[in-house]
């Protein structure tokens, strides 16, 4: 199997988009100018068992969806693009697929997602799935909040989670 990558613009900078023949396999908000991108590509290569090749234009289908999303249009990414789930396994995949059902502008708690994914009491595992998601924004992990309704973290950038929640709340 071959893998290819491109960069897609977001308000946070150019995001890394990695594709297989089956669909997007990774979407990461590390900026293309970020010095960690080569490390990230190495890490992805290890996980995929192949080195993704640069393919300018590979994100051409995704870019207008991201533009619409950031303009406040409710975009359901999993309904609009093919997702290759190979980097999400077991309960993490179940949790992420459950998160895909959270509607634009809505939120669920980590515990609610755990229950819907068939494992009540696995709220911490949902948090881990959100933190390690291979699909930032595309799988709306930003819609998963703490049980008290506060936003919580979003990787190392909780301000991005607040930005995304506010964006959806405004529209």
Image: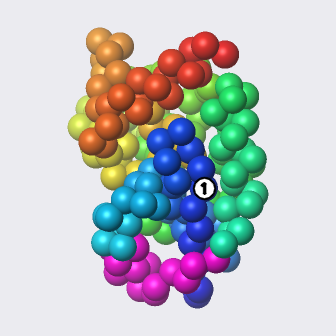
Q: Would residue 148 be visible to someone looking at this image?
A: yes
Q: Nearer the viewer, residue 53 or 132?
A: 53
The quarter in which the C terminus is drawn is: top right
Say if the magenta span includes residue 50: yes
Tell me if 40 is positioned left or right of 31 in this view: left
Quadrant of the image for the N terminus? Answer: bottom right
Name the residue at 35% across, 22% down: 151
**Magenta residues?**
41-55
Residue at image mark 1 = 8
Measured from the top left, where is residue 23 in percent x and y? 65, 66
Observer-nearest of 46 and 89? 46
**Residue at horizontal 29%, vertical 12%?**
148
Give the image location of residue 6, x and y in percent.
59, 68
Residue 81, above or below 41 = above
Q: Regarding mark 1 in the picture, which secondary structure is present there?
A: strand
Left or right of 131 on screen, residue 45: right
């Amino acid at each position: 199997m071959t893998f290819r990558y491109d960069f897609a613009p977001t308000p946070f900078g150019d995001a890394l988009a990695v594709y297989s023949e089956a669909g997007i396999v990774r979407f990461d908000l590390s900026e293309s100018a970020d010095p960690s991108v080569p490390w990230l590509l190495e890490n992805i290569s290890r996980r995929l068992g192949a080195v993704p090749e640069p393919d300018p234009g590979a994100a051409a289908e995704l870019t207008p969806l991201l533009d619409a999303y950031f303009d406040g249009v409710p975009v359901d990414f999993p309904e609009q693009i093919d997702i290759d789930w190979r980097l999400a396994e077991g309960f993490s995949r179940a949790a992420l697929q459950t998160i895909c059902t959270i509607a634009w502008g809505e939120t669920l708690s980590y515990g609610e997602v755990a229950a819907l994914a068939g494992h009540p009491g696995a709220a911490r595992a949902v948090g881990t799935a959100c933190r390690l998601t291979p699909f930032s924004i595309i799988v709306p992990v930003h819609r998963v909040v703490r049980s008290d309704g506060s936003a919580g973290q979003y990787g190392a950038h909780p301000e991005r989670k607040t930005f995304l929640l506010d964006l959806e709340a405004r529209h």
